Image (tube, helix red, strand yellow):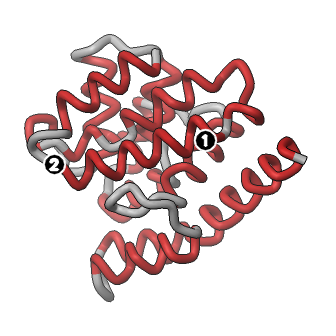
Amino acid sequence: MAAWARETARSILATPLPRRWAHTQGVAAQARSLAPIVGDDADLLEAAAWLHDIGYAPALVATGFHPLDGARYLRGVLGAQDVLCRLVAHHSCAIIEAAERGLAGELAEEFPPGPPALTEALIYCDMTTGPDGTHLTVEQRLAEIKTRYGPGHLVTRFIEAASPRLLEAVHKVAGQLQMAMA
């Protein structure tokens, strides 16, 4: 599944959005690093990492909310597994941003949240990878997003509201990884 997801994401993101593609490659690398703690779900997590931002692609934009647009494309056009669509739809506390956009009802109705452990692992992968694919601490990533969007922007408001949950998930997964590697 991960190989299919990589090629799908590459075909959708690499040319129109090379920086987003670089971020996606870094997120997928982080997902591979979590294999010791996700076990049999490693391939699914990596697939979700490859596909989490495809909704940014200009050809896929429908609502302007990339988690929903990406998940709808995966489900409707590609016939992807339900759990994969749900992970993409809810990545990195997307329900909080959906509320800011007036789309929380649509998101929740169409896509129930994914498995909590994989949802937290995907948060870890996304929130420890910068826009160019480099590894960052979660604190650096949150600061980078706020700086990029600026004060008062919808995404900045979302990040500020989601920060406690994002920090909690990243630190939890980092602790699990550290214990697994000990």
Proximity of marks 1 and 2: CB atoms separated by less than 8 Å: no
- Residue 4 picture quarter: top left
Horizontal side of 89 relative to 115 (left or right) equals left
Q: Is residue 80 visible?
A: yes
Q: Is residue 61 visible?
A: no
The residue at 38%/43% (across/down) is 25
Q: Which mark is residue 40?
A: none
Element class at badge 1 = helix
Residue 134, position as x, y percentages in the image = 43, 60
The residue at 26%/51% (across/down) is 20
Q: Nearer the viewer, residue 23 or 169?
A: 23
- Residue 15 picture quarter: top left
Location of residue 90 with respect to 173 vertically, above or below: above
Residue 1, position as x, y percentages in the image = 46, 15
Horizontal side of 130 relative to 29 (left or right) equals left
Q: Nearer the viewer, residue 22 or 168?
A: 22
Q: Nearer the viewer, residue 108 or 61?
A: 61
Query: Circle 1: is it few (<14), some (14-19), or many (20+) Cα within 10 Å?
Result: many
User: Which of disc 2 and disc 1 is earlier in sequence?
Assistant: 2
Q: Nearer the viewer, residue 20 or 153?
A: 20
Mark 1 to mark 2: distance in Å? Answer: 25 Å
Query: Circle 2: is it few (<14), some (14-19), or many (20+) Cα within 10 Å?
Result: some
In this figure, which residue is indicated by the disc labeled 2?
17
Element class at badge 2 = loop
Amino acid type of the residue that numbered disc 1 sits on in the rendered structure: Thr
Amino acid type of the residue that numbered disc 2 sits on in the rendered structure: Leu
In this figure, which residue is indicated by the disc labeled 1?
119
Residue 131, position as x, y percentages in the image = 34, 61
Residue 120, position as x, y percentages in the image = 65, 47
Location of residue 62 with respect to 149 vertically, above or below: above
